[in-house]
Amino acid sequence: MNYKIQKVLEIWHNHFKNEENQYSEFESSDIEYFVSCMLYNHFAFSKALDTMKTIDLSYDFLSSCGDEYDEIKSIIESIEFSDEIDKLKFLQEFIEESKAKYSSDELYLLNRMEYHVDGVIQRFINDEKITRIEFNKPVARSSNPLLR
């Protein structure tokens, strides 16, 4: 694993060892998930869907992560690659290595991130043009009142 990422994980795992720093639903795998979110946001993938250009960090995590956040953000922002394929590989490898550390019960958030990254990778492989997702498309109304 990249030494900068190892440092980030070490900082936050040490911080969250203290139960007073943990939020109510905290799991250790949350740290890797939120680091992956920060990487995803930092890399700003051109093939990300409009609705997935950035991934929000939870308020619970942000309010609990302590003064280390600025240091970690700086470390994340110092990770640079010349092209998006290298960024995707880096993030994909980080997620794979992170998932290997936890049981299947602890992988929900990391699996979710992996799904989003795999989608970006598929759009690169297929050289797909990003289309805008419309959530407010009119829906045909049924004359059956039970189906309205």
Image: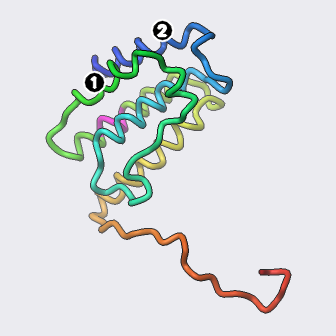
Q: Say which amino acid is labelled 1.
A: Ser
Toward which corner of the image does residue 137 lie, by quadrant? bottom right
* Label disc, if present, on residue 74 of the rendered structure: 1
The secondary structure type at the circle numbered 1 is helix
What residue is rendered at 30% in x and 28% in y?
76
Q: Position of residue 147 (x, y in %)?
A: 80, 81
In this rendering, position of residue 95 left or right of residue 141 = left
In this rendering, which labeled residue sits more in front, label 2 or label 1? 1
To which quarter of the image does residue 80 belong? top left
Residue at the extreme bottom of the image, as rendered: 143
Residue 8: image location, x then y, percent: 37, 18
Q: Over which residues does the magenta segment extend?
A: 89-93
The amino acid type, in three-letter code, at marker 2 is Asn
Query: Residue at 29% of width from left, 46% of height from top?
Result: 44
In the image, residue 64 lies at what x, y percent? 54, 21
What mark, if any, has residue 127 been given in the picture? none
Residue beneath the point at 61% across and 29% down: 106
**Residue 19 vs residue 81: left or right?**
right
Residue drawn where x is 50% and y is 29% of the image: 99
- The magenta stretch spans residue 25: no
What kind of secondary structure does the magenta stretch mostly adopt?
A: helix
Residue at image mark 2: 14
Q: Nearer the viewer, residue 61 or 122?
A: 61
Vertical side of 103 occupied by 116: above or below:
below
Residue 35: image quadrant is top left
Residue in front for this viewpoint, 92 or 18: 18
Q: Earlier in the sequence, mark 2 or mark 1?
A: 2
How many numbered tags mark residues here? Answer: 2
Query: Disc 2 vs disc 1: Cβ atoms closer than 8 Å?
Result: no
